[in-house]
Amino acid sequence: MLAILVKNDVLTNLNQQIYDAIASLINPPLTGAMIATSFWGEWYVWLSLAIILCWPAKTRTNFGWPLLFATLVAGALAVFTKDVFRIARPHIHWLVQEVGYSFPSGHVTISTAFVTTFLYFFLCSRTKKPWKVLIATLAILWVLLIGFSRIYLGVHNLTDVMGGYLVGISVAAAVIFAKETYQIKVCGK
């Protein structure tokens, strides 16, 4: 539905207003921070983390495999969705170079799928509540910051980022459902 609204230019004014507000913040130190933030949203960063969590037997089942699957599916779905909708990137001043279509943001899709999947299993773990609250807060803020960085850098619109969040959460929900339904239960032991 969101992609249809974007394709029909229904949300163009909203996208422009949000970009204008964010662009008013542009300055060299913040640009450097946003480029660094955006780097940490790259698919290969999340894929590397998932692979690392697949190695130790202690994290393989409840973190590694679900995160690896979520990352791969989210990446594939982002590429597929971009090709289906073929929504061009914003025609504004880019602070970094990007190629390909815009909707949904691949950085946001993959980051959201990874972090949502991670948080579900982490919050079901035996970790003490203060750590759960701290890690969950930081992880959610990080994913929101990645979305902000993509708009700040001029390579995505708000709707691209929103689409990324929706696709990422959907992928995470599917992975969590599959893991909980067809494998060992992690929550509610």
Image (tube, rainbow, N blue to C red):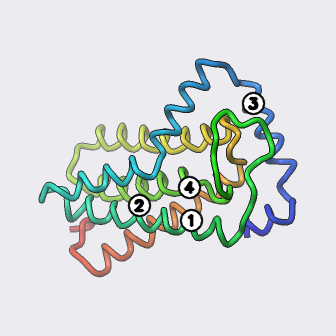
Comes first in the chain, label 4 or label 3 = 3
Query: To which residue does mark 4 refer?
Result: 106
> How far apart are the two marked residues, 2 and 1, measured between alpha carbons?
12 Å
Determine the secondary structure under disc 4: helix
Q: Amino acid type of disc 1?
A: Val
Left or right: residue 56 versus residue 104 is left
Query: To which residue does mark 3 refer?
Result: 23
Q: Is residue 148 positioned above or below 25 on the image?
A: below
> How far apart are the two marked residues, 3 and 1, measured between alpha carbons?
27 Å
Query: Residue shown at 34%/60% (left/top)?
Result: 67
Determine the secondary structure under disc 3: helix
Query: To which residue does mark 2 refer?
Result: 71
Query: To which residue does mark 1 refer?
Result: 79
Percent coordinates x, y for residue 149 in the rendering: 60, 37
Q: Amino acid type of disc 4?
A: Gly
Determine the secondary structure under disc 2: helix
Determine the secondary structure under disc 1: helix
